[in-house]
Every structure is written in structure tokens, then in C-alpha cells.
Image: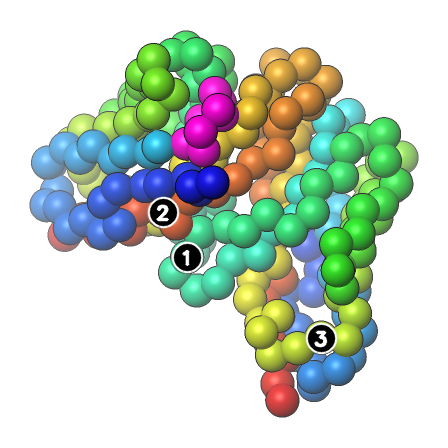
Amino acid sequence: KQEVTQIPAALSVPEGENLVLNCSFTDSAIYNLQWFRQDPGKGLTSLLLIQSSQREQTSGRLNASLDKSSGRSTLYIAASQPGDSATYLCAVMVGGTSYGKLTFGQGTILTVHP
Amino acid sequence: KAGVTQTPRYLIKTRGQQVTLSCSPISGHRSVSWYQQTPGQGLQFLFEYFSETQRNKGNFPGRFSGRQFSNSRSEMNVSTLELGDSALYLCASSLAAGAYGWGTEAFFGQGTRLTVV
């Protein structure tokens, strides 16, 4: 059974810092890994998708890496801003017949203060 | 391009009643998945539909059911509501959720907040 763990559970930093959020998963037979952000009471916004054959993806100030063999992914946020405050979730899609099923971590609650 | 639309946004129901939630995927997307989010359990997969067929189902009781229409719109139904069914229900759409993960990037709606009293 796939399990996803995110560390840390919560993070509070001053504006301008560079951040690293961690995600680990137990079954390396994944199709892809996706990072999301969720604002309070809202849905999930897709940030980055990394296919299993890729090592990293970048979008603006965000960079995500994937090491399938060790079951780890990191999300790097450069020059953090108060608007980055949200819960960040990673999710993996396992191969085989697990159609449409994402397995999520519990999330990292990020607070960036001015 | 419109995103994933879920209706209604908020619902309050009484124990024992049933409820139907609706999800309209992004135009051209054929796969729709449903998730339940609670503070204690986080996000849990309910089921996935593709071309009107349920292809995958999570570990939820039979009170939770769904369907997909020919235009890819999906509904989920919860019968005999329990207090523990109070949650944010999220719908995600993707192009295909096909072989080797092709077309599987998931896009979520804003959710339906269900409160059972």
C-alpha cells in the first residue's frame, strides 16, 4: 500500500527566504508525482507535475525534483512571499490499474510573514 | 478555458438524508475522480470514472456511489448520511488518466462543503 509522508508538517518563515518542502513515498512504482497548493477552504491548485521518467520540473520560483529510487521529492520555493502562505500537498499516482487515484501526503502548512 | 466546476459549494443535510453533488470537468477531459477531505484523514480517493465507466474505487462503504454522463459530467451520491460524512468533497478532472500515466495531470474544483447535522 502506497504511503506518502510530508516533512515538515508546518513551517513559518520571514519573507524572502528560500524554502525546501519534502515528500517521501513508499512504493517507487509511480507514474508521476504532483505538487499542489491549497488555500483555506478552497480546492487544490496544481503547481508542478513530474513524470516518473523526469528528474525535475520548474515553474517560476518553484522547482520540484524527483528521485524515484529513493522515494523522495522536494519542492523548492525561491524568495518566498506572503502570498505563498498555504498548505502544500504532494500526491503520487501509482502504476498499473490505479486509474485516477492520487495518494496524498498530509501536507505542509506554510506561513510566510512580512 | 473554464476550470472544474462543482455545485453546490455548500450543503447542510440531516442524518439519514441523501445528497447528490455535481462536477463538470474541464472541456475535453474524460476522466473524473472524487476525493473526500477531512481534518483527521486528509484527502482520500473515492472513485474514478472514464467514458461513463467506473474504473477504480476507494475503500468507502456502498452508501457512496457515483456516475458519469456522456458529456463527462459526473455526480456522486451519498445515501443515509452520517455525521462522519461531513467533509469537503473534491472533484478532479484529467485528460485521460491513461496508460503509463499519460494525460493524468489532475485539476481540481473548489469543492463542495457538506455538513451533516
Q: Residue at x 69, y 23 (%)?
A: B101
- Residue A93 at what x, y percent from top left? 65, 30
Label 2 Cα neighbours within 10 Å, binned few <14 / some 14-19 / many ≥20: many
| B69 to the left or right of B13 | right
Q: Quadrant of residue A11?
A: bottom right
Tag 2: residue type?
Answer: Gly
Compared with A41, A58 (above or below) is above
Instruction: Give the CA separation, mark 3 to mark 2.
Output: 27 Å
Q: How is the image coloured?
A: rainbow
- Residue B114 at what x, y percent from top left? 25, 48
| B81 to the left or right of A65 | left
Q: Which mark is residue A42?
A: 1
Q: Chain of mark 1?
A: A
Residue B29 falls within the magenta-colored stretch: yes
Identify the residue under disc 3. Answer: A80
Would you say the residues marked 1 and 3 are in contact, meaning their CB atoms lie under 8 Å apart? no
Q: Residue at x 27, y 33 (%)?
A: B22
Label 3 Cα neighbours within 10 Å, binned few <14 / some 14-19 / many ≥20: many
Q: Which mark is residue B111?
A: 2
Tag 3: residue type?
Answer: Ser
Residue A4 at least partly seen:
no
Q: Chain of mark 3?
A: A
